Image (cartoon, helix red, strand yellow):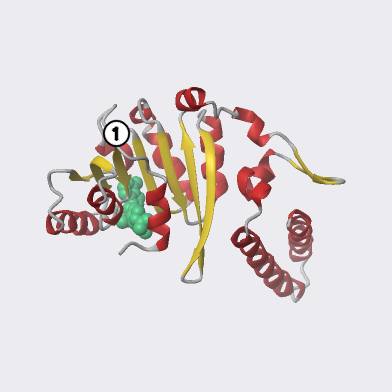
Amino acid sequence: RLSKRLEWIAQEVPKGSRLADIGSDHALLPSYLAQQGIITSGVAGEVNAGPYEAASRQVRAAGLKERIEVRLGDGLAVLAPGEVDVITIAGMGGALIASILEAGQEKLAGVSRLVLQPNVAEDAVRRWLLAHGWELVSERILEEDGKIYEILTAVSSAQAEETGTRAGERLYEPLSLAEGITLDREELQKFGPHLVREAPTVWQAKWRLELDKLEHVCMQMSRSDTEAARLREQEFRLEMKRIEEVL
Ligand code: SAM
């Protein structure tokens, strides 16, 4: 059985896809998608020997060697251009996901969809997508085992034109939430341009947890009497006020 997190990621992969799952670890996601008949072929990429071995064993044990190839290498370097049309990258930090996409840009020609699940720093992923013409078409958020995860799905600009979902920069235009409360691009990248509009319960819980964390940091800072700590605390208080306004 897949975790709820991987199941939700799997739901973002269209039937008939040729998939690459980068940082695949045990190759659970491509194995599941192949078993369900959703992908026609899969590549499981891993940069580390341990997870690469684990992925190879899993694919062999599941009898999926004909359909899933396990490859050892850094990021998108394991792919040939035009080989896949969907790429999933899940369970790592947003900065690492953005750097994998940045380093592998020539491998993205022909890819129509990216399904990305950063554990932290979702804003880094949104910034990268916007800067490179990818259209963020959906943002989902879930809680599992006390952790909260966001799943960002983006389509290429060509795909977005074709399906009439091209919003481009408009998604990040200043957004008025209430009298006097307007979010700029940077804030939309932090909160998520779809999530902030839909405001699902789990998303609200995520930002309430963030408020608790910031409150904790502020309490600790108020015990220090340095000027630097006082200024930092003021900054955090402002950030907290802003989050409260958005919620
Ligand atoms: N994608 C799986 C998931 O979401 O459950 C596994 C996530 S695991 C926490 C992250 C994996 O990414 C590790 O197995 C690690 O070896 C791999 N990884 C980290 N950097 C990578 C890179 N540059 N290229 C390929 N794999 C990478």
User: Residue 55, position in %: x, y?
Assistant: 21, 55
When asked about the image quadrant of residue 99, the answer is top left
Residue 162 vs residue 216: left or right?
left
Disc 1 residue type? Val
Q: Residues within 10 Å of mark 1 (few under 14, many from 20)?
A: many
Please tell me which residue is depicted at 66% across the width and 44% down the height of the picture: 188
Spot occupied by residue 122 in the image (x, y as percentages of width and height): 54, 49
The secondary element bearing badge 1 is classed as: loop
- State the image coordinates of residue 9 (x, y, percent, origin top left): 41, 51
In this rendering, would 227 be left or right of 74? right
Give the vertical position of 228 relative to 35 (above or below).
Answer: below
- Image quarter of residue 201: bottom right
Residue picked out by circle 1: 84
| 95 vs 54, nearest the viewer | 54
Q: Quadrant of the C terminus?
A: bottom right
- Identity of the residue drawn at 33% across and 62% down: 2
**Is the CB of mark 1 within 8 Å of ligand 1?**
no
Q: Residue at x 32, y 50 (%)?
A: 23
Residue closest to the far bottom: 223
Q: How many marks can you see?
A: 1
- For residue 128, side relative to residue 74 (left or right): right
Q: Nearer the viewer, residue 138 or 127?
A: 138
Q: Which of the 4 quarters of the picture holds residue 184?
A: top right
Taking 247 as reference, is 82 above or below it? above
Q: Nearer the viewer, residue 191 or 215?
A: 191
Position of the N terminus, as image quadrant, is bottom left
